[in-house]
């Protein structure tokens, strides 16, 4: 018999401006914010330990991310609860752009980024290996969590796959650059930040789940990262939104009752037919293109 | 160089443009900080966009030191000197002496169509179209052939709109330039091709739009 998830889970979203290629310094910043937040789960941005555009320092910055083993960044062992850190994972077919879930300094779970943007200003395919699996992280208290990294979130098939496995919350790490400063300037933020919010809120409402986005801030080269981390409730409402610039921390209580309540007005989740989707996808794959 | 007048009052830009200002200033300040540079020498500082660059950089918290190349040239050669000719050696001398970056206030329009740009490390407004820069300063500088193109197109706004479709939206040239007269479209493409070598050479430009020279891939 499945255990009943606990009623409430305290989430902190820590928005930082990682210093490029300085993991110890970034770990110190994260640990300080996380201790202050005292949450059950602390979510940080993509590559929050290393910065984004690490270039050929990628191997030097890589760490072992092996479930059960100690994670080699001592400052993070002081973080209470679970910490979702963004790191470069050393591995035989890596390095990988990985979300490492740490508890008391040990690796508890990991998600390797599946879709590596390699177009326009992005060059991730040059530096990282691509993850090949998607797992649900189940907490001892019964909450089921999905984790995606930045570009992963723009692939609805991944979200659907996690939702079909009954997640209660989706945690998204991002290092999303700002685009459209001119177009978005009426709100004083990048137009691209509005797009992330629309996707997060729509995803939350469609699946009746919490969606938390931790996006980094700060500058690397000519790129300004757009901040604006947020948490959307399972009814699609915006529960909290961080500043567009600078470090910030969001604290939200995620409620099991809110997840269930969001699914009562509709029957999308109840009626969803995964086998129908699989059948039709396979039929589509078999058709000549 | 021709000036385009918009009738806009300098310094009265919409407060929403603060987002653009913060990005430009943050990127330049971080470049100076991370390189431990001595500051920034601004070329063409006597133009409205050059003056704006100086004003914005001076307003950054912990501002990098800013030198105005035109003023340096005047100090070196006397007030009657043609600053456009004299500023480059003055700027390079200052940059070498103070380990400073050299910045030029050229717009994205000028970088895309204006041919070989000045030798500079930073282009603070390199992701801001000339018509947008006009909103901030009241006018923007265009090389004569680009100014002529703008007149033929019915204004720099029409040229920038076409460039935005071609560059930022990545539309095929035929579609992007369709609203323009055929001769104007042909001239725009000719000027665009002329700048190919610059698009391939990376420079530091604060990213503001969907597609930024020096950051996004260009052909």
Image: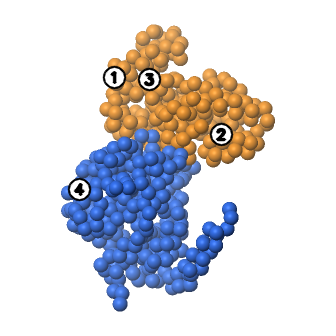
Chain colours: A blue, B orange
Q: Tell me the CA gap for discs 4 and 1.
A: 39 Å
Residue mark closest to the camera, 4 vs 1: 4
Residue B184's image quarter? top right
Same subunit: marks 2 and 1: yes
Which of the pair B29/A98 is nearer the observer?
Answer: A98
- Pointer 4 local density, CA inside 10 Å: few below 14, some 14–19, many at least 20: some
The residue that mark 2 highlights is B163
Marker count (numbered): 4
* Residue under numbered circle 4: A73
What is the CA distance from the residue labelled 3 to the residue labelled 4? Answer: 46 Å
Q: Which chain hosts label 3? A: B
Where does residue B201 sit, x and y in percent of width and height? 51, 31
User: Who comes first in sequence, dot 1 or dot 3?
Assistant: 3
Task: Tell me the mark number nearer the camera, choosing from 2 and 1.
Answer: 2
Classify B28 as above or below A236. above
Residue placed under numbered mark 1 in the picture: B98
């Amino acid at each position: 018999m499945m255990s009943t998830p606990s009623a409430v889970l305290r989430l902190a979203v820590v928005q930082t401006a990682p210093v490029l290629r300085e993991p110890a310094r970034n770990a110190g910043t994260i640990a300080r914010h996380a201790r202050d937040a005292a949450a059950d789960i602390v979510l940080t941005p993509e590559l929050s330990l290393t910065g984004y555009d690490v270039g050929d320092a990628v191997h030097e910055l890589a760490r072992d991310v092996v479930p059960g083993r100690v994670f080699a960044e001592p400052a993070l062992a002081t973080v209470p609860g679970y910490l979702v850190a963004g790191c470069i994972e050393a591995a035989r077919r890596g390095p990988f752009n990985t979300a490492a879930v740490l508890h008391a300094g040990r690796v508890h779970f990991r998600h390797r980024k599946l879709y590596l943007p390699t177009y326009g200003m992005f060059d991730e395919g040059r530096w990282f290996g691509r993850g090949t699996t998607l797992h649900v992280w189940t907490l001892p208290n019964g909450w089921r969590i999905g984790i995606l990294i930045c570009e992963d979130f723009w692939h609805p098939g991944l979200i659907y796959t996690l939702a079909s496995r009954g997640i209660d919350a989706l945690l998204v790490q991002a290092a999303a650059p700002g685009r459209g400063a001119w177009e978005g300037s009426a709100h004083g933020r990048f137009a691209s930040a509005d797009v992330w919010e629309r996707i997060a809120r729509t995803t939350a409402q469609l699946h009746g789940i919490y969606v938390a986005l931790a996006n980094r801030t700060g500058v690397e080269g000519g790129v300004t990262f757009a901040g604006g981390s947020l948490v959307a409730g399972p009814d699609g409402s915006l529960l909290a939104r961080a500043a567009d610039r600078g470090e910030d921390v969001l604290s939200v209580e995620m409620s099991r009752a809110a997840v269930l309540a969001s699914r009562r007005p509709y029957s999308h989740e109840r009626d969803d037919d995964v086998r129908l989707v699989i059948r039709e996808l396979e039929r589509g794959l078999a058709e000549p293109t | 160089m021709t000036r385009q007048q918009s009738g806009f009052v300098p310094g009265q830009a919409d407060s929403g443009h603060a987002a653009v200002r913060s990005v430009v200033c943050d990127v330049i300040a971080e470049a100076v900080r991370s390189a431990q540079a001595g500051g920034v020498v601004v070329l063409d500082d006597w133009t409205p966009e050059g003056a704006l660059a100086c004003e914005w950089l001076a307003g950054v918290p912990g501002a990098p030191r800013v030198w105005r190349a035109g003023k340096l040239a005047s100090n070196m050669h006397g007030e009657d000197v043609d600053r456009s000719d004299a500023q480059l050696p003055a700027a390079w001398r200052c940059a070498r002496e103070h380990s400073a970056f050299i910045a030029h206030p050229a717009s994205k329009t000028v970088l895309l169509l204006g041919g070989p740009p000045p030798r500079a490390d930073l282009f603070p407004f390199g992701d801001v179209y000339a018509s947008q820069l006009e909103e901030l300063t009241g006018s923007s500088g265009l090389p004569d052939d680009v100014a002529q193109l703008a007149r033929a197109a019915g204004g720099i706004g029409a040229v920038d709109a076409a460039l935005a479709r071609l560059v930022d939206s990545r539309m095929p040239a035929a579609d992007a330039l369709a609203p323009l007269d055929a001769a104007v479209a042909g001239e725009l493409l000719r000027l665009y091709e002329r700048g190919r070598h610059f698009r391939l050479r990376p420079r530091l430009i604060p990213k503001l739009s969907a597609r930024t020279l020096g950051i996004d891939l260009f052909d």
